[in-house]
Image (cartoon, rainbow, N blue to C red):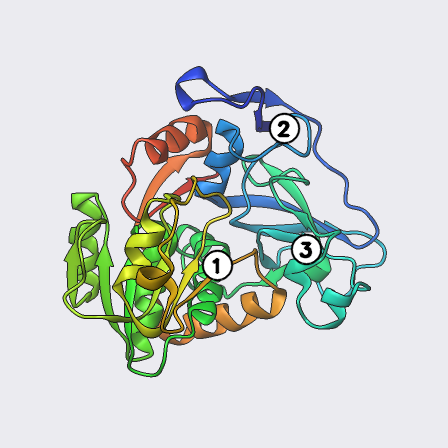
Amino acid sequence: MVAWVVERPGPMASGPLRRVERTAPEPGPYELLIEVSACGVCRTDLHLAEGDLRPRTPRCTPGHEIVGRVVRGGPEVRGFSPGDRVGVAWLARACGECRYCRASRENLCPRSRYTGWDIHGGYARYTVVDARFAYRLPEGPPDEELAPLLCAGIIGYRALERAELPSGGRLGIYGFGASAHLTAQLALTRGAVVHVLTRAEEARRLASELGAASVGGAYESPPEPLDAAILFAPVGDLVPVALSALDRGGTLAVAGIHLTDIPVLDYQRHLFQERTLRSVTANTREDGQAYLAEAALHRPAVHVQRYAMDRADQALADLAADRVTGAAVLLAD
């Protein structure tokens, strides 16, 4: 089968992705073999390709926002049949035994494994997934609209929960890519007032169309103090900017897996008066199920840029150059 691999991590201009022929995977006892229909292009894939994330599997195939159909399951799989529509997300496996797993915090499991980082992902014709970590998907929505929900949507959901936005509260969103444009809509359906701060003009336009109360530059101040904020841009310089915009008792959640260095914080200006800075790490299956259920009720408008699977390198290059508005999605050839 045809698959993309991270050959040598480096800047996109150096060609870190390579298209290869690879033997189709065989499902293990608890796994499903999936024929990929669509795969979202996540900034985490870009971090892996460019070397911001240390590769954990040689020549790994990226991609963890996968929509596809079950081809067959291993002998221990129950409840799935060939042809079922399923989703594959970032969290691929957790041990189920450690204190984090037992406390419903499997996203912190020390033995957790991740699709497109530890396990070959969806930039390929076929992939495998542990059936216990697969999501059943409805038949209605198009593949390209469902794919971004499986990471951008789920991680945005967890970030919003971590930000502890009060009912009807004022939310600031820093950066406005795939995850942010879904999270903004989720917050709006919950009655929030959303202020978007981002550098790209096209992203600002999309934020306005989706209902943001205000839209400004990434380093500008929102028109009112914020009850909560989420930082999606992987830019550490924005941490003190966002903290300064918080009202007393506000929380900033940093949603990315990678962040450039954070400048020195001034305690009185940035953290005093019980402002909170917290990170967001992966997701639990419970997060995924809760978000997909909420998305099914409100059907977010997923802004998609479509690419053929054989243009995965171009999709990542466009993401690196801020030429993607909303979510990029690879579609099967």
Q: Residue 206, relative to residue 261: is it above or below?
A: below
Give the camera-side residue of 295 and 221.
221
Q: Residue 82 has which mark?
A: 3
Identity of the residue drawn at 29% across and 78% down: 169
Q: Amino acid at mark 2?
A: Met
Residue 159 occupies quadrant: bottom left
Residue 13 pos. (x, y %)? 39, 18
Q: Considering the numbered disc 2 on the image, is that residue within a helix, a strand or a loop? A: loop
Residue 250 pos. (x, y %)? 36, 72
Q: Amino acid at mark 3?
A: Pro
Give the camera-side residue of 267 and 232.
267
Identity of the residue drawn at 34% across and 63% down: 268
Which residue bears the numbered disc 1?
A: 155
Which residue bears the numbered disc 2?
A: 1
User: Which numbered disc, 1 or 3, marks the residue that appears first in the sequence?
Assistant: 3
User: Which numbered disc, 2 or 3, marks the residue that appears first in the sequence?
Assistant: 2
Identity of the residue drawn at 29% across and 69% down: 171
Q: Amino acid at mark 1?
A: Ile
Name the mark nearer the viewer: 2 or 3.
2
